[in-house]
Amino acid sequence: MIIPIPTYLQQFAENDQQLDEVESQLQLCSSAGNQQFEIWYYGDLLLIEGEEMPFITGSTAKIVANDPLTAEEILLFDGTMHGYNALFCDEYTIEQRGNRPLQKYNMPATEIVLSFYYNIDYDEEVDDYEVDDQGYVQLISGETADWNTIKRNGYDAFAFYFKKEDKTLLAFAQEELA
């Protein structure tokens, strides 16, 4: 069974697991095998009562993990490209996609755990989409993607966590996307 995680993160996934019917989780690992990352982002920081850290948020948010040992950058989320809304609902201009300077999130390099939620049953709703004879779907951007990619990259929510020294998870980004 293939655990549904985004295709663009497959090569960086370690210890991926399906926690329940809708949630898949992975630990991030760089190409060099490193597991400690700094987080860089574009977007707003939203402090929610009861949460220890502010959440990175915004419709054009961009979140990148940087391996400080190799300088490898791994795109974790781009609100203009990833998730259900970016694939089927929200259109973005070249300007909205382009000029998004990143800033460092105020947290030292640490392990990163990513959760993706798949509440949409694409197989049951296949008739709601225009799927061509080769199994490709037209996206709102005008691009096309194969049906299996849609099912993996069309997640409808995510939560990203820092793994603390005591192994508990501390959220730094969380969004519903559909």
Image (cartoon, helix red, strand yellow):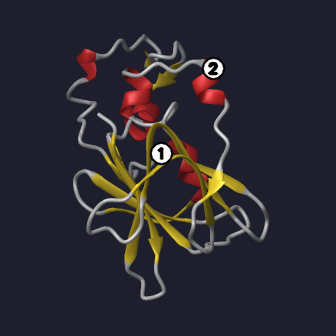
Amino acid on which the number 2 mark rests in the picture: Ile
Residue position for label 1: 6
Q: Residue at 34% of width from left, 37% of height from top?
A: 177
* Sequence-first tag of 1 and 2: 1
Q: Residues within 10 Å of mark 1 (few under 14, many from 20)?
A: many
Please state if 65 lies on the left or on the right of 150 as rendered: right
Q: Residue at 39% of width from left, 61% of height from top?
A: 25
Residue position for label 2: 94
Q: Image height check: is 30 above or below 23?
A: below
Q: Can residue 1 be seen from the camera position used here?
A: no
Q: Foreground: 70 or 95?
A: 95
Confirm or deny contact between disc 1 and disc 2 (CB under 8 A): no
Q: Foreground: 77 or 103?
A: 103
Count of marks overlaid on the render:
2
What is the quadrant of the C terminus in the image?
top left
**Position in image of residue 55 (x %, y %):** 41, 56
Q: Image height check: is 90 above or below 14?
A: above
Q: Foreground: 70 or 39?
A: 39
Q: Quadrant for residue 29, please give it.
A: bottom right
Q: Residue at 70% of width from left, 61% of height from top?
A: 31
Q: Foreground: 94 or 133?
A: 94
Please state if 123 lies on the left or on the right of 107 as rendered: left
Amino acid on which the number 1 mark rests in the picture: Pro
Q: Quadrant for residue 99, please give it.
A: top right
Under tag 1, what secondary structure? loop
**Position in image of residue 73 (x %, y %):** 70, 54
Q: Image height check: is 27 above or below 125?
A: below
Q: CA distance from mark 1 to mark 2?
A: 23 Å
